[in-house]
Amino acid sequence: MIPSPLYKDPIYDGAADPMVIRKEADGKYYMFYTQRRANQQVDGVSYCYGSMIGVAESVNGRDWHYRGALDLDFEFGHNTFWAPEIIYNPDDATYHMYVSYIQGVYLNWGGDSTIEHYTSKDLFYWDHIGPLSFGSLRIIDPCVFRLPDGSWRMWYKDERQGSATCYADSPDLYDWTYRGIAAGDCAQEGPNVFAFGGTHWMISDVWDGLAVYFSDDLEHFTRQPENILRESGTRKDDGGRGAHADVFVTGERAFIVYFTHPDPNYHPRSAVQMAELKITDGKLTCDRNAEFDVDWRA
């Protein structure tokens, strides 16, 4: 059966905001995540700042090991990287990463945030392209999905618009145009859009499990009544509500990769878990306690 937890960061014990991608060259799978410094004796929430982007590797999607952290610095200082989104563009055989960036380290939640664009041919070494400009300096948590016409759409959190999920479009992954609010019924973060079972879905972290939306046109989203990952799980390190997730779809199955704070007495520690998604009576559902296994090798 799938391990629980699926993955723990062996350096700082603070893996958060995970996302998974398959490498085109060798078929291996890579998990990129916010490497929070959870085991450091620091004040306030500064363990969430000064974070790098950690990298774990797997040949089958089941067994993961730590490979290191990305070198993304482009200016002086101990700076902060959160919540990477990486997609592969077959048109130019290039990986594109969009990552939340804050200059420096803060004791309390704060600091201007931008979404920085990088490109890579191998997922390990990245060239900095620059920040995206959507008229706000409090944007984080990008997600990118290719539209049917071949263009690209990005969803992200804008704290200056009530922490709504906003969206922007691009013809080439370089030039982006702000389009508006995609989901603003409540404050949220970490949007993730994917296709599964003939429907386009969006999940977002509303700090009460994950809200689920569905859409026919990837522009107008309707929320289903039930959140997923709201109730605490029974597996090891799967206590508490699931947070900031990615969905990896392979064949006819979809798997959600999320993080938890499993220790109520030591909140900073976090672990990555995986569960399988289902569609039940037209709704997206998730039984995080159900046993299952994966082997994503071709």
Image (cartoon, rainbow, N blue to C red):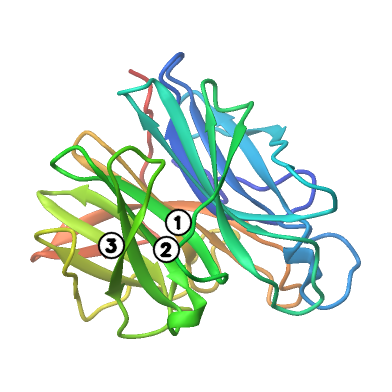
Can you say whether 164 is above or below 87 in the image?
Answer: below
Q: Are marks 1 and 2 in contact (CB under 8 Å)?
A: yes
Q: Amino acid at mark 2?
A: Tyr
Instruction: Characterize the local packing of mark 3: few (<14), some (14-19) or many (20 or more) Cα atoms within 10 angstroms.
Output: many
Query: Horizontally, is 103 left or right of 199 in the view?
Result: right
Q: Are marks 3 and 2 in contact (CB under 8 Å)?
A: no
Q: Amino acid at mark 3?
A: Met
Residue 202, disc: 3
Q: Earlier in the sequence, mark 3 or mark 2?
A: 2
- Pick the residue in front: 107 or 250: 107
Can you say whether 69 is above or below 286 in the image?
Answer: above
Percent position of residue 14, x then y: 70, 56
Q: What residue lies at 13% left-to-right and 40% top-to-bottom?
A: 149
Cα distance between the residues tagged 1 and 2: 4 Å
Q: Secondary structure at mark 3?
A: strand
Q: In the rendered image, which quarter is residue 100 located in?
A: bottom right
Instruction: Characterize the local packing of mark 2: few (<14), some (14-19) or many (20 or more) Cα atoms within 10 angstroms.
Output: many
Q: In the rendered image, which quarter is residue 202 located in?
A: bottom left
User: Which residue does the numbered mark 2 point to in the structure image?
Assistant: 156
Position of the N terminus by quadrant = top left
Can you say whether 60 is above or below 170 in the image?
Answer: above
Q: Amino acid at mark 1?
A: Pro
User: Which residue does the numbered mark 1 point to in the structure image?
Assistant: 142
Q: What residue lies at 51% left-to-right and 78% top-to-bottom?
A: 159
Percent position of residue 238, x then y: 54, 63
Cα distance between the residues tagged 3 and 2: 12 Å
Q: Earlier in the sequence, mark 1 or mark 2?
A: 1
Q: Earlier in the sequence, mark 1 or mark 3?
A: 1
